[in-house]
């Protein structure tokens, strides 16, 4: 599969089969994230794979809103929690000068590497940004001075899950040359 086809196939999966995902597959996704680029090569991330059923259910519960948004995380056989680590001094200084938090951009790049690798392995993923951060920190023994950046559900899509047609803004609406 070429890169454009892979990107086109990658979508947020919100319905999973009960088939287990093996450690080798998840580790390949993490390895793809590990080699992702980051500002000044700071690699400001730590990945926690949550597969133990009771703990996974508790972490999944921490992603569900009162209106049951994100309840698909309960079905996923595994979750990947990405913790934001402190960037290098150079990256911190550059962020202070430019008023940017480069580690959050880096985290997004690494997360998408996980999702693209999973897609190539015929796995489905969904990045979840709405969660009870304090609860996840408590459940996973994450130091209280750290931030949880994302939770990614990962598993085999349900049998009846089909590739949706992507609806995106037309190129003419999002692209200009030389000036805004």
Image (cartoon, rainbow, N blue to C red):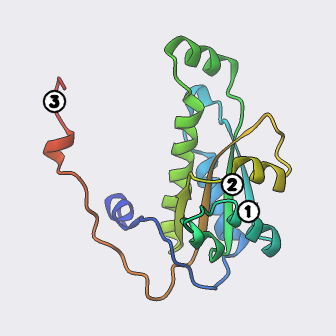
For image coordinates 56% across by 27% down, the residue present is 101
Question: Nearer the N terminus, badge 3 or badge 2?
Answer: 2
User: What is the spatial separation of the Cα atoms under label 3 and label 1, in whole angstroms?
Assistant: 45 Å
| Circles 1 and 2 in contact, beta carbons < 8 Å | yes
User: What is the spatial separation of the Cα atoms under label 3 and label 2, in whole angstroms?
Assistant: 38 Å
Placement of the N terminus among the 4 image quadrants: bottom left
Q: Position of residue 180 (x, y in %)?
A: 19, 26
User: What is the spatial separation of the Cα atoms under label 1 and label 2, in whole angstroms?
Assistant: 9 Å
Q: What residue occupies the far front of the structure in this picture?
A: 66
- Label for residue 121? none
Q: Nearer the viewer, residue 112 or 137?
A: 137
Disc 3: CA contacts within 10 A as few (<14), some (14-19) or many (>=20): few
Q: Position of residue 162 (x, y in %)?
A: 38, 80
For label 3, the residue is: 177
From the viewer's perspective, tell me whether residue 116 is left or right of residue 31: left
For image coordinates 67% across by 35% down, the residue present is 44
For label 2, the residue is: 81
Q: What residue occupies the far top of the structure in this picture?
A: 97
- Label for residue 59? 1
For image coordinates 57% across by 36% down, the residue present is 104
Question: Nearer the N terminus, badge 3 or badge 1?
Answer: 1
Image: 175 above or below 27 = above
Q: Position of residue 179 (x, y in %)?
A: 17, 23
* In front: label 1 or label 2: 1
Secondary structure, mark 1, is helix
């Amino acid at each position: 599969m070429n890169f454009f086809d892979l990107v086109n196939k990658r979508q947020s999966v919100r319905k999973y089969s009960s088939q287990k995902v093996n450690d080798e597959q998840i580790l390949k996704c993490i390895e793809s994230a590990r080699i992702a680029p980051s500002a000044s090569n700071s690699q400001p991330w730590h990945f926690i794979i949550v597969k133990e059923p009771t703990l996974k259910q508790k972490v999944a519960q921490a992603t569900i809103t009162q209106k049951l948004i994100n309840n698909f995380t309960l079905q996923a056989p595994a979750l990947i929690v990405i913790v934001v680590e402190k960037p290098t001094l150079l990256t911190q200084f550059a962020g202070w000068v430019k008023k940017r938090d480069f580690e959050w951009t880096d985290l997004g790049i690494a997360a998408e590497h996980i999702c693209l690798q999973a897609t190539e392995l015929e796995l489905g993923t969904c990045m979840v940004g709405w969660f009870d951060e304090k609860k996840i920190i408590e459940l996973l023994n994450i130091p209280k001075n750290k931030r949880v950046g994302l939770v990614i559900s990962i598993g085999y899509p349900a049998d009846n899950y089909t590739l949706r047609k992507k609806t995106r803004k037309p190129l003419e609406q999002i692209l200009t040359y030389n000036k805004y």
